Amino acid sequence: MDKFKQAKTDLNGIIFGKEEVIDLLFIALLAQGHVLLESVPGTGKTKLAKSFAKVFDGKFSRIQFTPDVLPSDVTGIRYFNPKTQAFELRVGPVVTNILLADEINRATPKTQSSLLEVMEEYQTTIDGETVKVEAPFLVIATQNPVESNYGTFPLPEAQLDRFLFKIDLGYPSKEEEKRILHTYRTNDPMESVFSSFSVEDIIMLQDEIRQITISNVVTDYLLALVQQSRIHAGIELGISPRGTLALMRAAQARAFLQNRDYVSPEDVKVLTPYVFEHRLILSMEGSIKTTALEVVNEIITNVAVPIEAGVDQA
């Protein structure tokens, strides 16, 4: 846990007032999920992603998405090398450990879909050849709100469902922005960040996460939240089984970071908005009356939280 404390201290010295967001990034990494950072331009989405990658000594790649980026620019290509007179495979930036997909919603739907396979299956297909992506693998994608941008393409449901969390960074408070001005006046603190974790560390921790106990009581609470998303009058498309598994795995990772060997109802409750909001598709009538986040909060309010922490294994 000392490594986590050091890494979080380093990151809190770069991105101010985002302790919860940093915790969510660690949860996603340990739960083998992916993160979509959404906020208006200039709020530190890219800097947060690059800083997070620095505390980890694995491979890091970045794709700056624009409308002219092709799927082969993402996954790779087989090309003819005139020197060797043979076709050779050149893998793309997805073959990495941490991938920054910057402004992902500026890519065309065809290019966005090139990430579907690798985000779910840890592999990518290049001209018929399957290339494995070694664990750990984390995609941190950034996007500006679709409705405020010209030349963007909304992410389809299948793409959104592959993100464990969607996180809105928002604006810093006045005090936080004052600290930003003071800190960045003379230097960039990102230059002083060093790796805290090795690839082997992360793989070992990901295995440990799966051993965290989740009781029948907590499992039933989690499933009740999921079921409510599927029968709510204002929702057309509720949480998928992939989303159910994602919430369970994220809750296990949060419990681990809280230094517990069991999942509590609070773990599930706290993470539900980040797991649910981007996965819900509201009905036409529902979208007129409310937002996805408001519906999620309504579901959380309507489902009774069990009193028992429940440490008996399901």
Image: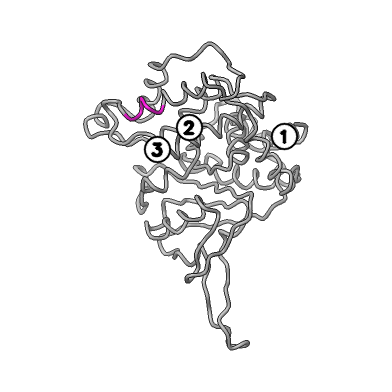
Q: Quadrant of the N terminus?
A: top right
Residue 188 appears anywhere in the view: no
Region in magenta: 226-230
Q: Which residue is mark 3?
A: 240
**Residue 223 colored magenta?**
no
User: In which quadrant of the rendered view does residue 207 lie?
Assistant: top right
Residue 236 vs residue 72, the one in the foreground: 236
2 up-or-down from 203: above or below: above
Amino acid found under the numbered disc labelled 2: Tyr
Q: Residue at x 69, y 52 (%)?
A: 58
254 up-or-down from 42: above or below: above
Q: Main secondary structure of the magenta part?
A: helix
Q: Residue furthest top?
A: 307
Q: Quadrant of the C terminus?
A: top right
Amino acid found under the numbered disc labelled 3: Ser
Across and down, in percent, residue 41 comes to: 48, 43
